Image (tube, rainbow, N blue to C red):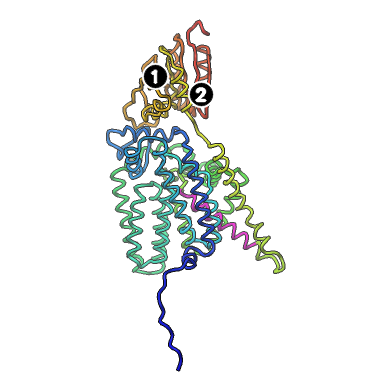
């Protein structure tokens, strides 16, 4: 009589089972890469770089909101998602207006995007490709940088990955209404934290809709309609509350002769190649690859797009469609294409570059006889991708050894506070007033110097204009310089006439991007005698004697 089998007992999942679900043996390497990426982001965050102009412009709105609040038009032609602004405001109320507090949310978003990247990439490309993509994503310089800036661009990356992730779930489980509801909630929340999330939703939503219609799956169409319905409702609410105020701002950034928008209709040959030109500029200026490596990256991304579309067209278009939507929006002057505005496309760039590199490897290996050392040839084929990762890793190392500062007004403010004498005058260049106001209002100057600021600063009333002042002057003891945007300089000459004939006059210059750096130096040198100077990253502090006898 055959021996009866023992009843099968359910057992808890073993570590091997967990590893298989996470991607087999690649999971441990993925966790290591994520840990490296988190450590790099944490190191940049902990360093506490000084706020620069772009951050100060949005932060002043948090410290002193406009009359309509953070959901109305912001001062200084700023725009940010309402959820991001409210979360930043709550953090400031709870922790304070320090630099680390202001960058806590972007840092958390950067870490969240890094953690989310691996499962999203694994649903698009094979594990080895996803692993290389993760290695590139973990060390991309702009992602490290914007994870420690008090702006919303790090949240854009997280939102783009989250929306892409739920789109992939909808693709895999097209009849599951629970997935549709979760996807709707994720997308609806993303819209309040990221303007770019809307562009991603339009792209992936169109791809999923076309796929469902082609498959003639009525159930899938109903499920997708449920998720999209939540997205549309959330977008309508966000527009009514906040997004409707961005029309003029978008026109300032994208309209006219902006480099972030093509000329329609094209007038020159350069207009036809604008997408390639702005993409190359972005790879060089934003990502930090020199021209040869930027060209390699572009070719790998192109090869990756072709390879992925051939292997899995739907997933390929889910990755590519948001970029196409941004190009269309740029042509319509509704969204800028290029620089930090397309940071949310970095996950797609990393995945496509890795996919293109492995396609190259397969081509090289497939054309060799079996006796050839396939491992060596495969490694050589992956060398371009390794070079891209290595360059970014070197940028990260340089950032840790010597953090890149756009401008650092803090040493100049401390020197000014410690060296101030009764009767001194202060001239603040137009670009320097925003950081000056932040460091004065946040209490940083008093806290670091141990004494109150020697000048009385008055905040300018809220103004949504692009060159609106942040401070009001009190001539001649305090003069807030005027902008030279558009080459208009008579206003600065009038300011210098107000100061002329007086004794010790301090000149603080920062963020001089419209030619006022050389202009101010020349004018003050012609007006009086320079007694001392100190220079810091993007900042100059001079002491002049402007009496006529001193010249």
Which secondary structure dominates the residues rendered in magenta? helix
Label 1: which secondary element:
loop
Q: Is residue 220 above or below residue 476?
A: below
- Do the residues bearing badges 2 and 1 touch, measured as CB atoms within 8 Å? no
Number of other residues with Cα within 10 Å of mark 1, as a class: few under 14, some 14 to 19, many 20 or more = some
Numbered range of the magenta stretch: 344-363
Measuring from the top left, give residue 121's x and y in whole percent.
49, 58
- Can you see residue 269? no
Instruction: Please identify the quadrant where the N terminus is shown.
Output: bottom left
- Residue 348 within the segment the image draws in magenta: yes
Q: Can you tell which of label 2 and label 1 is closer to the viewer? A: 1
- Can you see residue 167? yes
- Residue 85 within the segment the image draws in magenta: no
Q: Tell which of 339 and 416 is nearer to you.
A: 416
Number of other residues with Cα within 10 Å of mark 2, as a class: few under 14, some 14 to 19, many 20 or more = many
- State the CA–CA distance, disc 2 to disc 1: 19 Å
- View extreme (top): residue: 549
Measuring from the top left, give residue 535's x and y in whole percent.
53, 24
- Residue 540's mark? 2
Q: Which residue is mark 1?
A: 454
Q: Quadrant of residue 359?
A: bottom right
Q: Tell which of 315 and 268 is nearer to you.
A: 315
Q: Tell which of 481 and 16 is nearer to you.
A: 16
The residue at 62%/59% (across/down) is 360
> Which comes before the other along the chain, label 2 or label 1?
1
The residue at 35%/20% (across/down) is 456
Measuring from the top left, give residue 155's x and y in whole percent.
41, 47
Measuring from the top left, give residue 117's x and y in whole percent.
47, 55
Label 2: which secondary element:
strand
- Residue 226's mark? none
- View extreme (right): residue: 371
Q: Is residue 82 above or below residue 518?
A: below
């Amino acid at each position: 009589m055959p021996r009866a089998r023992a009843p099968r007992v359910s057992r808890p999942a073993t570590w091997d089972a967990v590893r298989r679900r996470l991607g087999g043996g690649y999971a441990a390497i993925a966790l290591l890469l994520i840990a490296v990426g988190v450590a790099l982001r944490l190191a940049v965050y902990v360093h506490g770089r000084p706020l620069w102009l772009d951050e100060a412009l949005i932060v002043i709105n948090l410290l002193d909101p406009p009359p309509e609040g953070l959901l109305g038009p912001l001062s200084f032609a700023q725009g940010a998602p309402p959820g991001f602004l409210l979360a930043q405001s709550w953090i400031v109320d709870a922790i304070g207006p320090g630099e680390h507090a202001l960058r806590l949310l972007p840092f958390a978003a950067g870490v969240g995007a890094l953690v989310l990247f691996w499962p999203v990439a694994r649903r698009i490309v094979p594990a080895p490709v996803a692993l290389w993509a993760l290695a590139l994503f973990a060390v991309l310089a702009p992602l490290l940088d914007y994870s420690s800036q008090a702006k919303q661009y790090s949240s854009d990356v997280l939102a783009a990955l989250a929306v892409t992730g739920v789109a992939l779930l909808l693709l895999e489980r097209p009849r599951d209404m629970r997935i549709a509801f979760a996807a709707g909630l994720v997308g609806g929340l993303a819209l309040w934290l990221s303007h770019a999330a809307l562009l991603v939703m339009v792209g992936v939503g169109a791809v999923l809709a076309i796929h469902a219609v082609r498959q003639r799956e009525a159930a899938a169409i109903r499920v997708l309609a449920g998720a999209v319905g939540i997205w549309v409702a959330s977008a309508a609410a966000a527009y009514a509350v906040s997004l409707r105020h961005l029309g003029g701002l978008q026109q300032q950034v994208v309209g006219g002769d902006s480099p972030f928008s093509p000329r329609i209709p094209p007038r020159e040959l350069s207009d036809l190649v604008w997408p390639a030109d702005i993409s190359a500029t972005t790879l060089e200026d934003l990502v930090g690859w020199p021209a040869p490596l930027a060209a390699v990256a572009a070719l790998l991304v192109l090869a990756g797009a072709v390879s992925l579309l051939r292997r899995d067209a739907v997933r390929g278009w889910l990755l590519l469609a948001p970029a196409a939507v941004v190009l269309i929006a740029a042509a319509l002057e509704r969204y800028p294409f290029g620089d930090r505005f397309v940071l949310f496309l970095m996950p797609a760039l990393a995945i496509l570059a890795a996919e293109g590199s492995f396609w190259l490897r397969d081509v090289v290996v497939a054309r060799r006889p079996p006796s050839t050392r396939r491992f060596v040839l495969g490694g050589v084929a992956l060398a371009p991708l390794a070079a891209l990762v290595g360059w970014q890793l070197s940028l990260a190392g340089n950032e840790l050894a010597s953090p890149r500062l756009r401008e650092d007004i803090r040493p100049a403010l401390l020197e000014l506070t410690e060296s101030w004498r009764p009767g001194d005058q202060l001239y603040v260049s137009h670009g320097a007033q925003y950081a000056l106001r932040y460091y004065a209002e946040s209490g940083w100057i008093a806290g670091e110097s141990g004494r109150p600021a020697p000048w009385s600063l008055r905040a300018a009333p809220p103004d949504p204009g692009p060159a609106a002042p942040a401070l009001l002057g009190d001539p001649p003891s305090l003069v807030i310089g005027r902008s030279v945007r558009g080459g208009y300089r008579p206003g600065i000459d009038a300011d210098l006439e107000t100061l002329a004939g007086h004794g010790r006059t301090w000149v603080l210059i920062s963020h001089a991007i419209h030619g006022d750096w050389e202009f101010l130096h020349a004018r003050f040198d012609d007006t009086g005698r320079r007694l001392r100077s100190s220079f810091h990253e993007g900042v100059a502090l001079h002491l002049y004697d402007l009496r006529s006898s001193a010249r």
